[in-house]
Image (tube, rainbow, N blue to C red):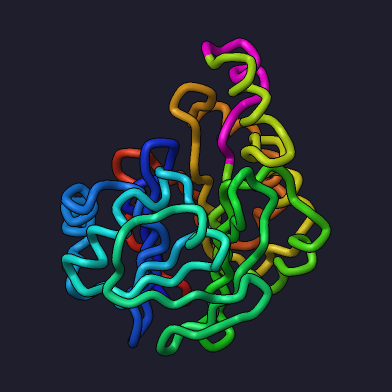
Amino acid sequence: MHFASIGSGSTGNGTIIKSEQSLILLDCGFTCKETVRRLALLDVSPEDISAILVTHEHNDHISGVGVFSRKYQTPVYMNYGTYCQKDLGKYSQLFLFNSFQSFTINDLHISPLVVPHDAREAVQFIFQLKHKRLAVLTDLGYISPYLYGELTNIHSLLIEANHDKTMLANGSYAPSLKKRVSGKYGHLENTQAVQLIQSIDLNQCQHLVAAHLSQENNSIEKVTKAFAPSLQALSNNIKLEIDLAGQESGFEWKYIQ
């Protein structure tokens, strides 16, 4: 299983998961034209996308879904809450999944994870190919006990590190937006992401990627400093690679061995 990103942040998101039989675009938060341009940077043709899988209805995750589906005849998978919340016009094909049941797309086993976020029915996902598991966990305000229980035997983790608390508090956002971002249904800040890393077994983890960084309320330096103690504790895992998902460039293909 391979995975890559075409961009991650408040102005657009898209993650690609690739197996022998599937090429899944997780969220399509850019325009169709921009999505195609970014896919090309990873040598992906839009016609090759097996399906678009949607986490929730916020524009930075869904704005290009309808047009892309119609133009390239791409099936779309979303839950009923997201479908009801956002009218994106017709889809080539639409599959509504149950947020509490796993399903498959070709050879990929996909488990939705219900997350606390200010959307109608927000989910994230664990992707499994044979015994290898990739967890994608962004756009949530806190890590619930349920999520801790689901994040076992993870071989790659894409985790939100949206903001630094001090930068957000001193930044230019309106008070209401600061409250939303830092609230229980907002976004994970750096130390919350670190708490997750410290609380689950990552001895099998090959890739740890910090994602959905705020361009205004976080920085590479802040994330690196916050993550450093946890990474030292994982230093016995010689396979572990650390990376950041950027807004403009995402990240290159990573292979889960």
Q: Position of residue 50 (x, y in %)?
A: 30, 77
> Does residue 114 appear to the left or right of 17 in the view shown?
right
> Does residue 140 appear to the left or right of 239 in the view shown?
right
Asked if the magenta segment contains residue 167, the reply would be: yes
Q: What stretch of residues is rendered in magenta? A: 161-172
Above or below, 162 relative to 37: above
Residue in the image at 40% along x and 58% along y:
27
Q: Residue furthest right?
A: 145
Quarter of the image that includes the N terminus: bottom left
Residue in the image at 64% along x and 38% along y:
186
Foreground residue among 157 and 231 = 157
Foreground residue among 57 and 170 = 57
The total of numbered circles placed on residues is 0
Q: Position of residue 93 (x, y in %)?
A: 32, 77
Above or below, 133 relative to 137: below
Q: Quadrant of residue 177?
A: top right
Residue in the image at 56% along x and 13% along y:
171
- Answer yes or no: is residue 227 visible: no
Asked if the magenta segment contains residue 21, the reply would be: no
> Does residue 74 appear to the left or right of 45 in the view shown?
right
- Answer yes or no: is residue 15 visible: yes
> Does residue 177 appear to the left or right of 20 in the view shown?
right
Q: Position of residue 233 (x, y in %)?
A: 73, 50
Q: Position of residue 200 (x, y in %)?
A: 76, 60
Residue in the image at 64% along x and 30% along y:
180
